[in-house]
Amino acid sequence: MLAAIGAADIETLFADIPARLRNPQLNLPPALSEMETLADLRELAEDNQHAGRSALFLGAGAYNHYTPQIVDALIQRGEFLTAYTPYQPEVSQGTLQAVFEWQSMVCALTGMDVANASHYDGATALAEAVIMGNEHFRGARRKVVLSPTLHPHARGVVHTYTQGLGLSIVGEDLPPDVAPAALADLVDDQTLLLAVAYPNFLGQIDDLQGLADRVHARGALLVVMADPLALGLLTPPAAFGADIVCGEGQSLGLPLSFGGPYLGFFATRKSLVRKMAGRVVGETHDRQGRRGFVLTLATREQHIRRERASSNICTNQGLMALAATIYLSTLGKHGLRQVAELCWHKSHYAANLIGALPGFRVVAPRPFLKEFVVACPRPVAEINDFLLYQRNIIGGYDLGQDYPALKNHMLLCVTETNTRAQIDDLVGALSELS
Amino acid sequence: MLEPLIYDLSRPGRQGVTLPACDVPPTPLPDGLARTTLDLPEVDQLTVVRHFTRLSQLNMGIDTTMYPLGSCTMKYNPRVNETAARLPGLAAAHPLQDPETVQGSLALMFALQEWLADIGGFAGVSLQPAAGAQGELTGVLMMRAYHLDRGDTKRTKMLIPNSAHGTNPATANMAGLEVVEIPSDPRGNVDLEALKTLCDDTVVGLMITNPNTLGLFEEHVEEVVAAVHACGGLVYGDGANMNAIVGKVRPGDLGFDVLHYNLHKTFSTPHGGGGPGSGPVGVSARLTDFLPGPLVARVQDQGETQPPHFSLVTPPKSIGRMKAFWGNFGVLVRAYAYIRANGPDGLRGNSEYAVLNANYLRAKLEDVYKLPYDRVCKHEFVVEGVWADAPGVHALDIAKRLVDYGFHAPTNYFPLIVHEALMIEPTETETRETLDRFVHALRTIAEEAHTQPQLLKDAPHTAPLSRLDEIAAAKQLVLCCRPVALSA
Amino acid sequence: MNVPTDLKYAKSDEWIRVEGEVATIGISDYAQDALSDIVYVDLPQVGASYTAGQPFGSVESVKAQSDVYLPVGGTVTAVNEALGQTPELVNSDPFGAGWLVKIQLTDAAPLAGLMDAAAYTAFCAGRAH
């Protein structure tokens, strides 16, 4: 091969690299065989506690739901796994049709008209919603209202993404039990959008009725960040007049995987589709008139708009969207609702028992689906240590980290994967701490 | 129609999985909370399996064919990495568990941070960005924050070569910066003189891809970096093309201040038909305080006998977090496995073979395809997919015809500075026999372009569908098969 | 390339037909050809006002998107609603059925700086397509 190139040796091919910097010494560990590589990773994996080894009552944006076995089997098919973004539609119809089905299911869950292929996660989807709002008003409005009960990480990402855009972000310092109506009071004619969570970070299902009217009266947009699994049961945000519905799709069959890869979903009204970021698949036909799918609306994207593009996203979470599509196909209309109802019944069973324990109090003024706040008689970290090391239970999320007012408050999550025996164990363990 | 939509396979009452019965006393749902309709399909499990299996069969992937997509590094994705990412300890750990209980995950991330820093020649690495484009935004926000932190508020311009990927200017725009384009010189380098005249105290920095999108190593890279540094600017490296230089040169040694790695390119993690990717960023010492948080840090070592201990920390001047939790962890596991399996010599060897393979293809094709920049390339090269004596044949036709020969198309119509560009990247994982078959196919196509051009214009002939009508798609905008229209 | 002689042209490829206080604006044959098949036209609301040189909308093909600028100052009195369903009118009849907006002139001074058909033809010839 070198002879064909006319090069004396491989090094000749790197002659354009400054010689004194070429072939640096790398301080990496030496190569391992496949068997040894796997052994090394098994050793690391063994150092973790995890939901396969302990009962898990932790949610807070990442949920332990049951995933049918076919989901992972199918996404490991090489033709899905090892394909690139579907730039050549004739040889990418599998990916393209699956994305089209995903878009359709996101529309079904949210009630919105159009959806995109995905975002990196729910937090970045929310940040892109804010940027889309900014683009929609072309800089004429500068204020963003964020509910304090949006996921703290999602609010953080909004701040990171928009730091060069000169927006003012308000609302986050309101008390965590603020009603949506009080957030609407902050919306004025300088406001791009109001973003709320559904259910919110504290597990509460806020009443969004009438909110959109108040936001729209000021000419602003309403963004609802939703848990799509909850939408298997709850009234879809479009019914409340949402303009953008986005969120974290991990609950649809994706493993916890220590926080990623997850799946941002994004849906909006048809009238706003040209302001939406991300890949979009549309239906068309080939030269013989057969139905097929292509990436469309590319003129919104970075490769065409370059410095005029408002988002730079290209690679997204394609395989995770495929997993969610297979999950939703497998559970279907009734299965998804059944999962959501199991969460409802089990979390209420747990909340009723925990709320009856001396020293513990359930703080849930509004309905909840799978998460609820518990005021505890001791620091949450102390309780969690006891649960893990004495009872092999991974406890809830310490809300004092994000909300000073919620010191010694724990966010507990109960899903269909938690058996009655696990819940009874949790309650029994907590009773020892009363 | 190749395969019905999953919705078309739906029949009332079917379901693909059974769920456990409720084992607790039920709590009634309040009125008005639940939705009245949910338009999801109702399908049995075998139908779901067949549907998605048949869909997969309509795709090309690296597992089925050589996929020489330029700047995308479609190398083999080792299956052992898939097994690793699915180990229960890694796949079933919750991101918000007490760090004490996830020391395995943190140790893995810490090692990967250190390894990537070493490979790139950087002082610090954040694993948080979820893709290359997000790594770019991370880097550009850090550059902006660095200047502002020094009270240097008049820097608003980002210099970007005209050969750059579209994400570079789009990223600068997202960060609220003004883009200034720099021309390329006749050898495909950044035009150094033009760059120097643009370097002043309003420049945030330069975004540069090296090797660039022509597959060429910047011949004056040190002067380019020096010019930007001289005016107080910083240099951003787009690491999309790292597969040419891992173990051969470290961008940090060249003076780059920040660089994103594409784990789904250079480090063999699968692209998944559009992600998930992972785009960690490495930075020089002056930017480490600005890295997105949290990072994994090694806390005090508790003596020789105790294993090291890890925690999550946020740098003092951090630009903030780029996504929820700590990054696309499952992708990090795969990249960790790849680096562990290859070791330093293996990684260097992979770059060498990637460059050898690209130059071999270049040498075998240069007499039939015009090379606008004819010099030793790195891991990829760009040809013009057009001939004066074959009017009407375009790069797109060649790309589509390659499918008939059993190859995925190269990247086409990019970079923009090459007329009818075809950008070819074979990677190190293709055998010589495959490369020879690819050469044969492209040479045959060049012949066909002159003798039977219609064959190209009607291609592909063997794909599941013929060419698709993108204009109709953009006009009718059917983006969803179930118009629910609640939001109308 | 068709360049009607009764119109004025801007360097950004819009044409303008002035009839008293009212003017009609569209994009030239050269521009529609360069964009190729137009799939979407974004037009302003009736009543919107622009100063000369401001973008008032955009024209999109599959591969490109181009803003369109008002060559003079004016207030939009009508937009070509037909383009919502049939944007290809801009391709097939750029100077007729493919018009974009009608305006009430508020600042006609920039008219003097626009090109006539001969000058615009020469301007187009001087550009690499």
Image (cartoon, coloured by chain):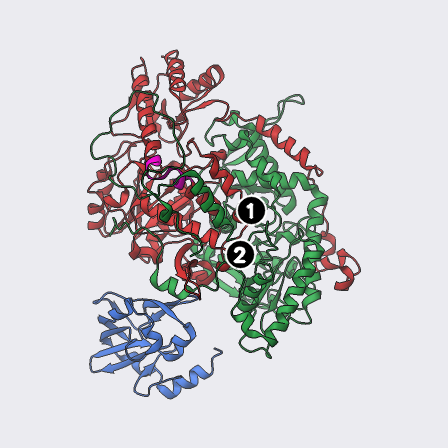
Chain colours: A red, B green, C blue
Q: Magenta span: helix, strand or loop, mainly?
A: helix
User: Which amino acid does the dot numbered 2 rest on?
Assistant: Gly
Q: How many marks?
A: 2
Q: Is residue B83 magenta?
A: no
Q: Is residue A334 magenta?
A: yes
User: Which amino acid does the dot numbered 1 rest on?
Assistant: Gly
* Residue span colored magenta: A327-336
Residue beneath the point at 41% across and 72% down: C35
**Where residue A331 sits in the image (x, y, percent)?**
38, 37
Q: Residue furthest top?
A: A432
The image shows residue A261, relative to residue B416, as above or below, that is above
Name the residue nearer the viewer: B107 or B20: B20
Q: For the residue labelled by badge 2, is the local secondary structure a helix, a strand or a loop?
A: strand
Location of residue B354 by image quarter: bottom right
Q: Chain of mark 2?
A: B
| Tag of residue A78 | 1
Q: Chain of mark 1?
A: A
Location of residue B214 by image quarter: bottom right
| Tag of residue B205 | 2
Residue beneath the point at 71% across and 56% down: B432
**Where residue B379 sits in the image (x, y, percent)?**
65, 57
The image shows residue A213, relative to residue A398, as above or below, that is below
